[in-house]
Image (cartoon, rainbow, N blue to C red):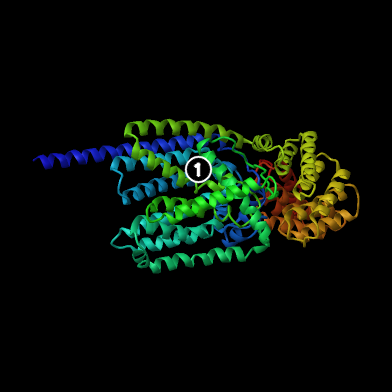
Amino acid sequence: MVARFQARFNGSSTARRMKSNVRLLLAAVVLTVLAYLPSLHGPFLWDDLSEIRDNPALRTLVPPWRPMLEGGELPHRPLPYFTFALNYAVHGLEPTGFHVVNIAIHLANGLLLWWIVRESLRARAGHDANQIASAAMATAAIWLVHPLATQAVSYVYQRIELLAALFSLGTLAAFIVAAGSRRPWPWYALSVVCCAAGMACKEWVVVVPIVVLLYDFTFLSGDWTAVRSRSPYYAALAATWGILWLVIRSQAGRYPEAGFTLGESLLYAANQPTVIVWYLSRLVLPTGQSLDHGAVLETDLFGAGWPRLAAVAAFAAGVMMVVFNTRRRPVTAFLVVAFLLLLAPTSSLVPVHDVCVEHRMYLASVIPIAAASALIAHIVPERIFAGGATVIVLALALITGSRNTVYRSGLAAWGDAVAKSPGSSRALSRYGTELSTAERHDEAIAACRAAVRRNPRSTAAHAALAAALLNAGRDAEAVEVSRAGLTAGGSVPPGQDPILDRLVLYLGIAADRLGDDRGIDLLAEAVRRRPESVAAREHLARAIRGRDPAEAIRQLEAVVSLDPANADAFNNLGSLLLATGRPAEAVARYEACLRLVPDHAAARSNLVTARAAVGRPVPAAE
C-alpha cells in the first residue's frame, strides 16, 4: 500500500516537474523572440549585400547547384546559400523573412541544447532529477538570450553559423539516441547525415566527428574498447570530411587565408589566447559587442608581445594539465578540449582574415555556460538556483534586446562599430557607405577618407571612397581614388579580387561620365572580370546604347537572365528594343517588368507606345 502510494506520489511529482519544464521552455522561447524583435525588420548588412542582396544566383532554385555554388564574392557554403534562395523564392529581398528564419534556427538550436545537456547529466552520476532539469533549463535559456549570440542571429549572413551549429547539435543528439536504442542504425544514419549537412555549412564542423568520439568516451562508453565497437559509425562520420574537402577545393581561390606562411601562423596563434580570454569575459560581462572590432595582430613579439607569449605558455600549460588529468576528471577534460576544438579552426594556427569575431563563439559558448550551470545547480539549493537563473535570464534578455536595436539600420550598426573601434578602417568605410546611401554625402566622404588614412593599402577603403564620390557627383575625384586603389591592390589577376574588380567598374563609370572614351573600355573590362556582375553590365549597356545598341541589348539580356527580378532592366531593355524597331519584343519585356512591379509607371507608359506600334492598342478601360 505504502509502495503504491509512493509510486503515485513520485509519478505526480515527475508530471509536475515535466509541466514546469515545459512552461520554462516556453518562457525562454518567448523571451528570446522578444529580445530579437528590435532586429526583425533590420536591413541587410555587410556580407549580406554581396552574398544575398546583389547575388543573382539566389534568384532561382533550379538547378539547385546554382544558388549553392555560384554568384557572390565570398567562399560558398552550399546549404546556407540554398536557404537564402528559398527565402528569396517566398518573399523576395524583404529582410524580415530572412530574420525570422534565423531566429527560428536559433530557437531550434536552444531546444536541442536543452535535450543534450539533460541527457549528458543523466549519463553521469552525482546529479538528482531536479538538478538535471534545472541545469539543462538554465543552460538553454541563458544561451538563447545571451547578447554574445546576437551577431550570429541578427546578422543575416551568419545563418551559416546557425546552420552549422544546428547540424552539429543534431549529429550529437542523434548519436546519443542511437547509443541507447535497441535499433540504433537509423539514428546512426541520421547522425551521419547531419554531420554531412554541417560540412556543407561551415569549415569548423571538421572537428565535430572528433568531439562526438570524445563525448562517447567521456559520457557513454567509458573505455576505448566500447568506443571501437562503433568503428563503422565513426568511419562514416570521418567520410563526411570528403564533403568539406570538395567544397573547399572547388573554390580555393575565394579563400583569402590561402597561402599563409609558417611565420604568419605562429603570429596568429600567439594572439589567440588573448582573444579567447576576451570571448570568455564577454560571457560573464556581456558588454562591448560590435559588428566589427577592428582587432589587429600584435606583431612585436620581442617587446610588448612578450606578455602575450607568456599568456600563450600559461594557456598551453593549463590545457596540458587538464589533458593529463583526464583519468581523474574526464568530464572537465572533455569540456576544455571540446571548447578548444570548436574554436580551433579559427583560433589556432590558421590565420583567418579577422582576428576576433563574436559569432565564432556561438556554439563554443555552450560549453562554459553548461559547465557553470551544472556545477552551480549541484551545490546551490534548487529554489535559490531557480531564482538566480531567472534573474540572469531576464537581465540578459534586456541587454540582448538593447543590443539588437543597432541592427535596425545600417547607419546604427556601423555607427556603433565606429564608436567602439574608431581605429578600424573597415568600420569607417562601411559607415561612410551607409551615410552615402542616406545621401549625407559630405559626412560619407569624410568617413571614407578617414578610412583611407587609417589604412592606405586597403582597397576596400578606396572602393568605398570612390563610390561615395560617385554618389556625390564628384567624378574627377572618383577617378583619382579608383586609380589609387588599383595601385594599392597590386598585380592581382582579373577576377581574383572582387574589390579590385569593383574599382575597375567605378573608374569606368567616372571616366564615362566625364566624357572619356576610355570609360567604355573600362566598363567592358569590368564585365570581363566579373561576367556575373549585374551592375557592370547595366552601366556598360547605358554607356554604349547610343553607339552600339545591339551590344547594349545583349548586355541587358544578360542582366535579366542573371537577375530575372530586375524590373528596371526589363523596362530599359524594352526601350532599347522599341528604339531599334523591335516593338513586339519590347511589349514582352514591358509586360515582364509589370508582372514584377505592377505600378511601374514608366513601363506602363512605354507599353502603350509599344502595343500601338504592333497594332495592339491598350483598351481605354485599362
When the figure is inspected, residue 121 is found, relative to residue 431, above or below; the finding is: below
Task: Say which residue appears at 58% left-offset and 53% top-offset.
Answer: 346
- Relative to 487, 246 lies left or right: left
Q: Amino acid at mark 1?
A: Ile
- Relative to 82, 212 lies left or right: left
In terms of depth relative to the viewer, which is nearer, 538 or 597?
538
When the figure is inspected, residue 372 is found, relative to residue 193, above or below; the finding is: above
* Quadrant in which the C terminus appears: top right
Q: Secondary structure at mark 1?
A: helix
Pinpoint residue 551: horizontal percent, then vertical percent. Answer: 81, 60
Task: Say which residue appears at 46% left-offset and 46% top-offset.
Answer: 366
In terms of depth relative to the viewer, which is nearer, 565 or 144?
144
- Residue for badge 1: 103
Is residue 157 visible in the rendered image? The answer is: no
Task: Say which residue appears at 45% left-offset and 42% top-offset.
Answer: 369
In terms of depth relative to the viewer, which is nearer, 599 or 93?
93
* Quadrant in which the N terminus appears: top left
When the figure is inspected, residue 547 is found, relative to residue 279, above or below; the finding is: below
Pinpoint residue 142: horizontal percent, then vertical percent. Answer: 45, 38
- Residue extending furthest left? 1
Pinpoint residue 345: horizontal percent, then vertical percent. Answer: 56, 56
Pinpoint residue 281: horizontal percent, then vertical percent. Answer: 54, 39
- Relative to 155, 508 lies left or right: right
In terms of depth relative to the viewer, which is nearer, 270 or 392?
270
